[in-house]
Image: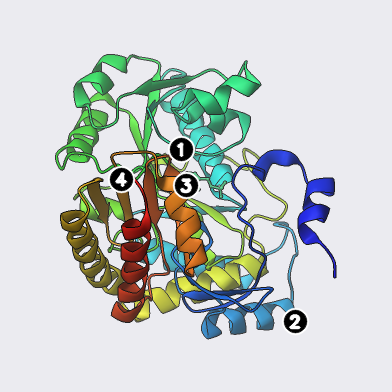
Amino acid sequence: MTDWYEIEKKYYMRTFEAVRLPVILIRGKGARVWDDQGKVYLDFVGGWAVTSLGHAHPVVTKAINRQAGQLIQTSNQFYTIPQLQLAELLVKNSCLQRVFFANSGTEANEGAVKLARRWGKLKKNGAHEVITALNSFHGRTLAMTAATGQSRFQEPYQPVPAGFKHVEYGNIEELKKATNEQTCAVMLEPVQGESGVNIPPPDYLPAVRRWCDQSNILLILDEIQTGMGRLGTLWGYQQFGIEPDIMTLAKGLANGVPIGALLAKEEVSVFAPGDHGSTFGGNPLACAAGYATLKYMIENNIPEQAKKIGEYFYGELQKLKQKYSFIKSVRGKGLLLAVEFEKEIGSAALHSCLKYGLLVNKVKPNALRFMPPLIITRNDVDEAVQILDRVLDEIIV
Ligand SMILES: *Cc1c(COP(=O)(O)O)cnc(C)c1O
């Protein structure tokens, strides 16, 4: 039998060495995945907050199959219908008016920063600086590494592109102090995902919005993780009663087919012909998957379902907190939740969950994150919580 672990070790770059778990996943259905030994897991990672309708959702699979048999790629020299259907559906269901499609979240963010800089050049005397938050995550290209407010992502690649300033997340005074006439935009996640599910104080984003209006600065919301129903509303900004000038999407948008999207208000959409582009971005295959996903999500009220089941899950995690004194906090919104421990037991808990058939993410050495498909049931939550309970009971703190 082929030893895939050896093949990986021999041929793949070592980038994932520290994170890969000893599991070879073969197929998935709904909230469950199966490995090459036939063992089943309850999937509370969901392809990293991606497979929001669950694995192999029949509606999305059908759309992909149909489009794959018809036309996968044309280049943007031609019109294609799925791209325009998805663009129209996004605009009709958000506060933004124009769309550009990319292939990933990072790429959507690059486009957002380019658009903000273009706007600054045309409308604000060449303002080009973007303020982002400490502990943010915006992606892995050189510029998005610079945008990300965590030095460990930047250090191996210094010098990284200039033009980014980082301020404490949740602190409006710091943001005000960092602003000057060179500032063209503020870029924030509505809830910080990769640094452990950090929810800002309730008045923070409204205050940022007011400050941006007052200072003629664009507000870019990176909704790559929080968008597409994850927080219990279709878009994260709806939770805070504000509207961004620019929003980026990716993860859940096509239920697993790679895609990214950049959305902007009409008056901010200042790209001129030739200013930006993409070979694959907006191709019919990805957009057909995205269209099927978003349409299904809206027609079936999936964000509302995520809100309800998220509240139930949160409540069950709170019960675990009552039981185990070494749980420091339970936090999150919708189905983006985390449990933080007093000690660095994340890795032990993760491996133990794996053993009992539950996939989770160790978001920090002392915290687990849950980002399951939005279609999970109470039974799925009960099963996951039972496994967690057993895992925590067995763990030696
Ligand atoms: C995942 C993520 C990204 C990067 O997206 P990729 O598709 O991996 O390029 C950027 N921002 C946020 C908030 C994310 O969660």
Picture residue at 46% right of the left edge, 43% below the top: 269
Disc 1 target residue: 137
* Quadrant where the C terminus is found in the figure: top left
- The mark closer to the camera, 3 or 4, is 3
| 191, 371: nearer the viewer | 371
Amino acid type, mark 2? Gly
Q: Position of residue 141 (x, y in %)?
A: 62, 35
Indicate which disc residue 347 carries.
Answer: 3
Q: Earlier in the sequence, mark 4 or mark 2?
A: 2
Q: CA distance from mark 4 to mark 1?
A: 19 Å
Quarter of the image with the N terminus is bottom right
- Disc 4 marks a residue whose amino acid type is Glu
Q: Secondary structure at mark 1?
A: loop
Query: Are the residues flagged by discs 4 and 1 in contact, CB closer than 8 Å?
Result: no
Q: CA distance from mark 3 to mark 2?
A: 43 Å
- The answer to whether residue 248 is seen in the rendering is no
Label count reads 4
Three-letter code for the amino acid on which mark 3 is drawn: Ser
Instruction: Tell me the tag on residue 340.
Output: 4
For marks 3 and 4, the one nearer the N-term is 4
In the image, what residue occupies the spot 36% across and 61% down? Answer: 230
Q: Earlier in the sequence, mark 1 or mark 2?
A: 2
Label 3 to label 4, Cα distance in Å?
A: 12 Å
Q: Is mark 3 within 8 Å of ligand 1?
A: no
Q: Looking at the picture, which amino acid does disc 1 mark?
A: Phe
* 3 or 1: tag closer to the N-terminus: 1
Q: Earlier in the sequence, mark 4 or mark 1?
A: 1
Please state which of residues 155 and 281 is positioned toward the viewer in this rendering. Answer: 155
Instruction: Determine the CA span between mark 4 and mark 2.
Output: 46 Å
